[in-house]
Amino acid sequence: MTHRFPLRVYYEDTDLAGIVYYANYLRFIERARTEWVRSLGVDQGRLKAEEGIVFAVRRVEADYLQPAKFDDELVVETTLEQMGGARIVLHQEVKRAGKLLFAATVTLVALSASGAPARIPAILRRPLH
């Protein structure tokens, strides 16, 4: 199951040359992950309030392949690669008209209110199995 999140490159996303600033790809994939979780029926604010569970990025491996530019229409594709007790590994790609511009493998961990690793809640496990 691949989740697709469309976005447009705004002027604020670019550097002086009109090319997307490299760190903004991380913002793009973060937005897409948030929408992916929302599409699964999970309200992250409620998850934190009711169960004390939040997710944190533990690792990102990123490949910048081609630049995106001002006003480009992009799609971020998010695919689940692995899910363990407290860990989720996702593969995310940013594409323009089907052409791969950026790819990342992102490892997320579920954390309790105290910051300790926590089991991924059933509300998120169910739709992923």
Image (cartoon, helix red, strand yellow):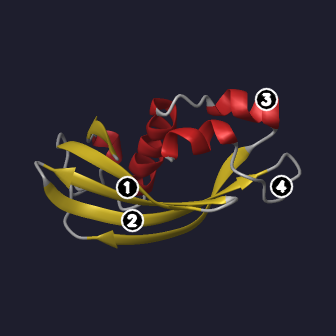
Answer with mark 2 or mark 3, whichever residue precedes in sequence. Answer: 3
Packing grade of label 2 (10 A; few <14, some 14-19, many >=20) is many
The amino acid on which the numbered mark 4 sits, given as a three-letter code, is Gly
Counting from the top left corner in percent of width and height, residue 69 is at 19, 51
Q: Residue 49 carries which label?
A: 3
> Is residue 18 visible in this depiction of the protein?
no
In the rendered structure, which disc, 4 or 2, sits on the residue that comes first in sequence?
Answer: 2
Determine the secondary structure under disc 2: strand
Please tell me which residue is depicted at 23% across the width and 56% down the height of the picture. 19
| Mark 4 vs 3, N-terminal side | 3
Distance of mark 2 from mark 3, alpha carbons? Answer: 30 Å
Whole-angstrom CA distance, mark 1 to mark 3, is: 29 Å
Tell me the distance, in whole angstroms, between the alpha carbons under discs 4 and 3.
Answer: 15 Å
Secondary structure of residue under mark 1: helix
Residue named by callout 2 = 104
Which badge, 1 or 4, is on the more N-terminal residue? 1
Residue 67 appears left or right of 97: right
Rendering coords of residue 36 (x, y %): 44, 39
* Marking on residue 115: 4
**Measured along the vertical axis of the image, is residue 84 above or below residue 39?**
below
Image position of 10 (left or right of 114): left
Q: What residue type is labelled 3?
A: Ala
29 or 119, which is in the foreground? 119
Which residue has dot 1 on it? Answer: 25
State yes or no: discs 4 and 3 in contact (Cβ < 8 Å): no
Mark in front: 1 vs 4: 4
